[in-house]
Image (tube, rainbow, N blue to C red):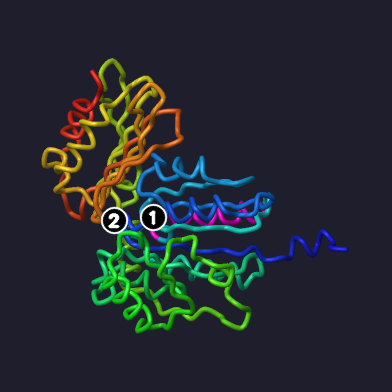
Amino acid sequence: MTTAAAIVATPVPVNVITGALGVGKTTAIAKLLSSKPVDEYWVVILNEFTDVGVDALTLAAAARGAYDVRVIPGGCLCCTGELDFRRQLRAILQERRPHRILIEPSGIGHPGAVIEELRGQERAGALRLASTVGLVDPKRLTVFDTEGVERDQIAAADVLLLSKADTATADERRLFETKARQSFPPKRWIGLGDIDALSTTALNPPADKYQFMLPARPDVHARAREQAQKHVHEIVPQERATQFGKYSIAATEHLLLDRRACGWTIPREATFNRVKLVESLEQGGEGLLLDVERLKAVLRTGIDHWTLFDVSAGGTNNQPCGWRQDSRIEVQATPGADVDWTRWDQYWRSMLAK
């Protein structure tokens, strides 16, 4: 018979899903939630740039059985979101202990520091760090040969998966496999298919296959942490009033780690013109997208139709969404860009259905 003490002592497996902005991390987690055992309770920790929580909405209709999603804003879990990350993690482990925890660091975050924090919890026996899954875009394979956060994400992962595999050419698939097998530290598992290709073995490394990890540019992480602590006042979101048709709303501006972002939450009664919006975003958003690193939005685009929009270096995508409560927008500017957010106010207003 399993005792209560034994249950409490059982470490919770944790998977880190990492990768560049727009590579498909949230989509991958949604698929994992949709295929999880229905009788298991999973928790997802999402690290987003703002507190609008667009990614969390996309998971709502995907999960089978019980799950929970915790959103930590701040751009980097171990810089601007360090204290919240630790608090959330401890609360999760002390409350209703889940069968598994999935963590999605922001695409601009430093995964090595997240893993170091988890290692500390692992040594205390509270959790077991399972695989760190790195997603790689087939159209951005140069990441293997460059320096920066995206390269750090590959180094920190012991499992590499080719994201958006259905869009990859045969040459891109061969190049990914070659680069992945040449990567250091060596990868324990390499996948050329969709997230569905992740087997139990890929998610759960054998006990004798302890993950080896290189430090993820600790000097850069230290500078980011110092900046976050030095400019605490900049981390606090700044709200300003703006008008969307007949609706008065608050736009929330953020300045974090040399990046600016703005979020809008709009009443569900407001409807956007989907055809006009798709065409505009594909053509550069009237020039506004030149200074944008990432755009995510869930918008009401019909009487009973809601659309998820996603714009990044990987392209512009849109798909139906099950969210029905309100419309939410998050725009993240490229590093150093000085964005006039009132122009974005005007842009979104121009996309409202007449």
In percent of width and height, residue 14 lies at: 57, 63
Identify the image quadrant of residue 99: bottom right
Secondary element at tag 1: loop
Please name the amino acid that badge 1 sits on.
Thr
Identify the image quadrant of residue 145: bottom left
In percent of width and height, residue 84 lies at: 49, 52
Using residue 135 as the reference point, say whether residue 13 is left or right of it.
right
Badge 1: how crowded within 10 Å, few (<14), some, or many (20+)?
Answer: many
Secondary element at tag 2: loop
Q: Quadrant of the N terminus?
A: bottom right
Q: Which residue is mark 1?
A: 80
Badge 2: how crowded within 10 Å, few (<14), some, or many (20+)?
Answer: many
Closer-to-camera residue (190/216): 190
Give, as a single range, the part of the protein colored magenta. Answer: 79-94
Closer-to-camera residue (231/157): 157
In percent of width and height, residue 169 lies at: 27, 66
In percent of width and height, residue 140 lies at: 25, 66
Q: Is residue 9 magenta?
A: no
Evaluate if marks 1 and 2 touch, with contact meaning CB atoms under 8 Å apart. yes
Residue at image point 51% right, 40% down: 61
Q: Which residue is mark 2?
A: 257
The earlier-in-sequence mark between 1 and 2 is 1
In the depicted structure, whether residue 149 falls above or below residue 46: below
